[in-house]
Image (cartoon, rainbow, N blue to C red):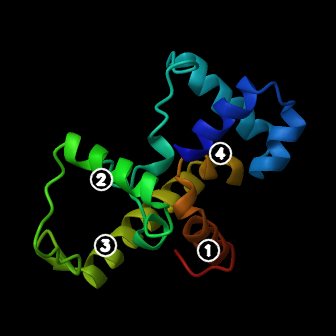
Amino acid sequence: MVTRYNVLKLVEQGKTDTTICRALQISTGSLAAYKAHLTRNDEWHQADPLQPYINGSGRFIVIPVEKARRLDQSKTRQLVEILAEVDVEIPEKIDVSYVHGRTRSENHKASLERIRRRVLSLIKKGETPEEIYTRFPESQLGTVRAIRAHYTMGHYD
């Protein structure tokens, strides 16, 4: 989603395809796919400006605490006013190590297994690496590349 949003912004700025591909480190084929997706879904001028800040679950906007603490007093006050206006509940304590009945480690392993199954399925369907990469968010591309590399070395049946 972040790449799609970045493609949209660069196109709106009038950047050339070559410049966009270099800036985002994507192929011209991937760029064409992103542009087609934006046009097809009528999102060209309706992209969500919050998208780059939304976490993977799509439920939260993520603001790293260390970056929020660097804001000057005026901006900190504005941020607090915004959070109060959108009625953000401030929990006493959030236990992020235990989600949906599993520990963080168990959730991570389950997530990796889902990604592995999906990548292997796409490889077996004959999709090119570029086609496979466009199907995953940027945050998972390292994992996807590692799975492809292990597949080419014969680690999977």
Q: Residues within 10 Å of mark 1 (few under 14, many from 20)?
A: few
Pointer 3 residue: 110
**Residue 81 in the image, given as x and y percentages of width and height:** 28, 46
Nearest to the eye among marks 2 and 4: give it.
Answer: 2
**Image quadrant assignment for residue 65:** bottom left
Q: Amino acid at mark 1?
A: Ala
How far apart marks 2 and 1 lie (CA) works out to 41 Å
Of 16 and 88, nearer the camera is: 88
Q: Residues within 10 Å of mark 3 (few under 14, many from 20)?
A: few
Q: Secondary structure at mark 4?
A: helix
Of 118 and 78, nearer the camera is: 78
Instruction: Specify the label residue 146 is tagged with.
Output: 1
How far apart marks 2 and 4 lie (CA) works out to 42 Å
Pointer 4 residue: 131
How far apart marks 4 and 3 lie (CA) works out to 24 Å
Q: Secondary structure at mark 2?
A: helix
Q: Earlier in the sequence, mark 4 or mark 3?
A: 3
Pointer 2 residue: 80
How far apart marks 2 and 3 lie (CA) works out to 36 Å
Q: Secondary structure at mark 3?
A: helix
Q: Earlier in the sequence, mark 2 or mark 3?
A: 2
